């Protein structure tokens, strides 16, 4: 059986084991998904609502989420920072009628994110504008609704296409919901669950509830909070009367204790169901539900991070929100598969860089067991450099989100926290990433001296804004976070620690993240013994991990990055970043297995081939294929977490190697190439504990197709099918070096995209064909609830077609 099939089967089994197919959506009673039957028009020259409604005649039917930028085309007229993809202005409209419309009820439209500068109208009435494209927001529709037909219109203005250092996407690229509630109801984001005291025998629970009364009269209601275990049994509850002033909000706190609490952790992500309900005259009129977890954690300046009383290392990765062909409109099922790949790695923590991500991604982290740093901004009041021609190439631009910061910054960070504060996975809020990047834009005289590994320009630049401003702004953002949540520390990821140490910036934070500053850990720990220092963004060097394992006060590494991502690209024709240990299609690279050998205790061994011996030690240019010219020298690299490994070529031993890593040498063998089977056997205490095999592939003989179904969305009945397609020889081996075009014919579903993982491909991401890369291709298919007899045919020239029912 080929290694690719083993990997795919392992992911499917893992997904089933983790139970990620069970859908859990934090929602109010009366919540519906509002994603279907939208119309879209991209009209870069039309800026006003009146003109759009009068002159746009060509609309196309779409379903949300929708990202128009990823539709392309790729072109070097755009910016490398955002993946050489276009921006512009997009208009969306939806005509709808509300079933059983009741004018006494409250109707709210909720957007999980619209990139960017969104404006919303209902029946011609302007509801508001939200500049930040990553923040969730909602509007009251009630005063303007009609009993029959209504029209909702959304404008997204992304004309500043080079406004980011990474791919943002464009449009309504996340879910939209419609909430229908009675006049007395739980506010959106109005429930806050905490567990201030937890022991083995008992946990104290506190539930804060904001109850809104939209009626013109005072009202008395009963509010109830109930906690249920995984079997649906009530383990604790409390009810109380609440007096609601007319047209106002009342805040109540319900407290109770539960016995024998089950703690949430990455190894055992146990979740309870929390139900909050409002009752009037003995009848339930509104309810809210979510899944919550019980856990304690703390950061210690001397000893690192403790979860549920146990000292724990955070084995983390940073992620962006896109997934190649899908752009920023990534279905939950795709992230579930991606997180399963990280779980198999041994990863237990995720940094949501550098903005709040899709709502369901936090649900998955709760369910699958990932500790999370949630992050608000990549810039504050002044813009950073945005690369146009290529990363660190040419003259940068300075468009960005900073223009709205003065007015919206504190509201944005508060809304980030309010939306997600009930997730047990989240252990810290970050108010910014690399805001202190030296001279980009802030500067300080200390840049004329000392070590500054990350710096734009040379030395102190007096004309730039002073670094002293960092402390003032950080303090205001920290205060905004703590106004809505004091249960977690507030942090930021610092790039220019040398400079920031001369400001109030670090002191404004509860814990201080260091980006690529491992060399400063020990000296700063001595200089600031009460400062909690952790690695917030790190390279993949062995020494960077040893800085965590060798220093007890350092608790984490957040690797840059988990996955390749669109944008932050080198010069054209490259249009995506290859920084990930997993490619755009979700397939692990050789460095994934190096990290697995460091982070995972389950015995493993892995082989990769280098063209030159020094690449074994530099861990660069490695490939997963045993293929070459007979008699040529090959260097075989080995990653393992065992005592020793023996290498066999066609059954002949090439000796055992002790598995030791250091900065100058990595385990490996020099082998004279001959085709056949290359096999590694791993030993621990003299016993065989793991194997890994590479076979020389033959000619392409046929297509292999594997499918994985995501959960059925309970709000609209649709599901996502993920298809892995690869070129195979007669023996079932992947053939990586014979790439050819693959075509998909789909009946009854929607092809969301095809992804090969090729960072330089400019093929149409919305087309029905794509060339394989390293012999592989991934397809994403959306199947609506009403779809019947969905079938797909996969074709490639010279090979038999593969037909599947989906």
Image (tube, rainbow, N blue to C red):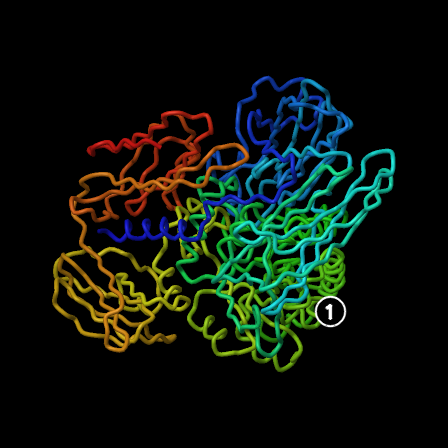
Position of 607 compared to 449: left or right? left
User: Farthest residue in the front direction?
Assistant: 282
Residue 595 vertical placement versus 72 (above, below): below
Please provide percent x and percent y for residue 686. 23, 77
Residue 238 vertical placement versus 509 (above, below): above
Please provide percent x and percent y for residue 323. 46, 45
Picture quadrant of residue 582: bottom left
Q: Which residue is mark 1?
A: 504
Specify the quadrant that holds the C terminus: top left
The reply to whether residue 615 is visible in this rendering is no
Residue 395 vertical placement versus 524 (above, below): above
The reply to whether residue 614 is visible in this rendering is yes
How would you rate the neighbour count of disc 1 (Cα within 10 Å): few for under 14, some for 14-19, many for 20 or more? some
User: Farthest residue in the bottom direction?
Assistant: 526
Position of 420 compared to 77: left or right? right
Residue at horizontal 26 percent and vertical 61 percent from the top: 609
Residue at horizontal 50 percent and vertical 37 percent from the top: 713
Picture quadrant of residue 172: top right
Please provide percent x and percent y for residue 342. 43, 56
Position of 306 compared to 539: left or right? right
Residue at horizontal 22 percent and vertical 57 percent from the top: 694
Please provide percent x and percent y for residue 672. 15, 65
Count the numbered circles shown: 1
Picture quadrant of residue 721: top left
Position of 278 compared to 339: left or right? right
Please, what secondary structure does the residue beneath circle 1 have?
Answer: loop
Quick one: 301 or 474, which is closer to the camera? 301
Quick one: 267 or 37, which is closer to the camera? 267
């Amino acid at each position: 059986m080929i290694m690719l099939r083993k990997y795919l089967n392992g992911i499917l089994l893992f997904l089933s084991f983790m139970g990620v197919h069970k859908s859990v959506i934090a929602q109010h009673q009366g919540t519906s998904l509002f994603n279907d039957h939208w119309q879209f028009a991209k009209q870069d020259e039309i800026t006003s609502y009146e003109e759009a409604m009068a002159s746009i005649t060509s609309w196309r039917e779409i379903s949300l989420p929708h990202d128009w930028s990823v539709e392309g085309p790729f072109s070097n007229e755009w910016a490398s920072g955002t993946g050489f993809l276009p921006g512009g202005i997009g208009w969306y409209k939806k005509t709808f009628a509300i079933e059983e419309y009741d004018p006494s009820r409250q109707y709210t439209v909720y957007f999980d994110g619209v990139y960017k500068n969104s404006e919303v109208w209902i029946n011609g009435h302007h509801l508001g504008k939200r500049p930040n494209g990553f923040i969730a927001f909602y509007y009251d529709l009630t005063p303007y609704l009609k009993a029959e037909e209504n029209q909702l219109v959304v404008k997204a203005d992304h004309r500043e296409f080079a406004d980011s250092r990474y791919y943002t996407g464009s449009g309504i690229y996340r879910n939209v919901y419609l909430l229908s509630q009675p006049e007395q109801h739980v506010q959106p984001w109005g429930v806050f669950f905490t567990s201030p005291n937890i022991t083995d025998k008992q946990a104290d629970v506190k539930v804060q509830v904001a109850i809104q009364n939209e009626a013109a009269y005072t009202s008395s209601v009963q509010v109830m909070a109930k906690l249920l275990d995984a079997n649906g049994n009530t383990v604790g509850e409390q009810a109380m009367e609440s007096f609601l002033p007319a047209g106002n909000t009342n805040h109540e706190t319900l407290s109770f204790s539960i016995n024998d609490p089950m703690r949430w952790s990455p190894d055992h992500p146990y979740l309870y169901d929390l139900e909050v309900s409002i009752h009037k005259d003995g009848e339930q009129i509104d309810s809210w539900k979510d899944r919550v977890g019980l856990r304690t954690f703390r950061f210690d300046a001397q000893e690192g991070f403790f979860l549920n009383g146990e000292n724990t290392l955070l084995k983390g990765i940073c992620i962006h929100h896109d997934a190649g062909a899908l752009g920023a409109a990534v279905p939950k099922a795709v992230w579930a598969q991606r997180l399963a790949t990280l779980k198999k790695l041994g990863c237990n923590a995720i940094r949501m860089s550098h903005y709040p991500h899709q709502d369901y991604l936090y649900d998955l982290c709760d369910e699958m067991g990932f500790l999370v740093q949630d992050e608000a901004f990549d810039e504050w009041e002044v813009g950073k450099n945005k690369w146009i021609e290529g990363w660190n190439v040419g003259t940068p631009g300075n468009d960005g989100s900073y223009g709205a910061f003065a007015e919206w910054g504190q509201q944005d960070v508060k809304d980030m926290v309010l939306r997600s504060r009930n997730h047990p996975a989240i252990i810290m809020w970050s108010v910014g990433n690399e805001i202190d990047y030296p001279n980009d834009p802030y500067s300080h005289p200390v840049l004329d001296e000392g070590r500054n590994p990350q710096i734009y320009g040379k030395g102190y630049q007096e004309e730039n804004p002073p670094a002293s401003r960092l402390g003032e702004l950080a303090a205001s953002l920290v205060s905004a976070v703590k106004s809505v949540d004091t249960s977690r520390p507030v942090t930021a990821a610092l790039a220019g620690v040398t400079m920031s140490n001369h400001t109030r910036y670090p002191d404004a934070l509860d814990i201080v993240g260091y980006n690529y500053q491992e060399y400063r850990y020990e000296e700063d720990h001595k200089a600031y013994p009460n400062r909690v220092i952790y690695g917030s963004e790190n390279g993949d060097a062995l020494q960077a991990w040893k800085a965590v394992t060798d220093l007890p006060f350092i608790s984490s590494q957040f690797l840059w990055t988990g996955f390749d991502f669109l944008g932050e690209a080198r010069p054209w024709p490259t249009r995506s970043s290859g920084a990930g240990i997993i490619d755009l299609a979700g397939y692990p690279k050789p460095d994934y297995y190096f990290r697995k050998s460091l982070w995972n205790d389950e015995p493993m061994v892995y082989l990769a081939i280098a063209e030159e011996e020094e690449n074994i030690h530099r861990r660069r240019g490695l490939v997963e294929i045993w293929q070459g010219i007979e008699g040529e020298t090959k260097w075989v690299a080995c990653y393992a977490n065992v005592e020793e490994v023996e290498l066999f070529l066609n059954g002949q031993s090439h000796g055992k190697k002790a598995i030791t890593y250091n900065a100058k040498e990595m385990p490996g063998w020099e082998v004279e190439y001959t085709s056949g089977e290359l096999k590694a056997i791993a030993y621990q205490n003299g016993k065989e504990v793991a194997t890994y095999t590479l076979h020389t592939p033959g000619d392409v003989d046929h297509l292999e197709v594997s499918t994985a179904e995501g959960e059925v969305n309970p709000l609209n009945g649709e599901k996502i099918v993920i298809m892995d397609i690869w070129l195979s020889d007669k023996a079932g081996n992947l053939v990586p070096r014979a790439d050819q075009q693959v075509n998909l014919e789909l009946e009854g579903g929607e092809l969301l995209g095809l992804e090969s993982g090729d960072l330089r491909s400019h093929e149409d991401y919305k087309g029905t064909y794509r060339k394989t890369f390293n012999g592989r291709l991934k397809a994403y298919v959306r199947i609506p609830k009403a779809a019947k007899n969905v079938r797909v045919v996969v074709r490639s020239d010279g090979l038999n077609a593969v037909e599947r029912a989906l």
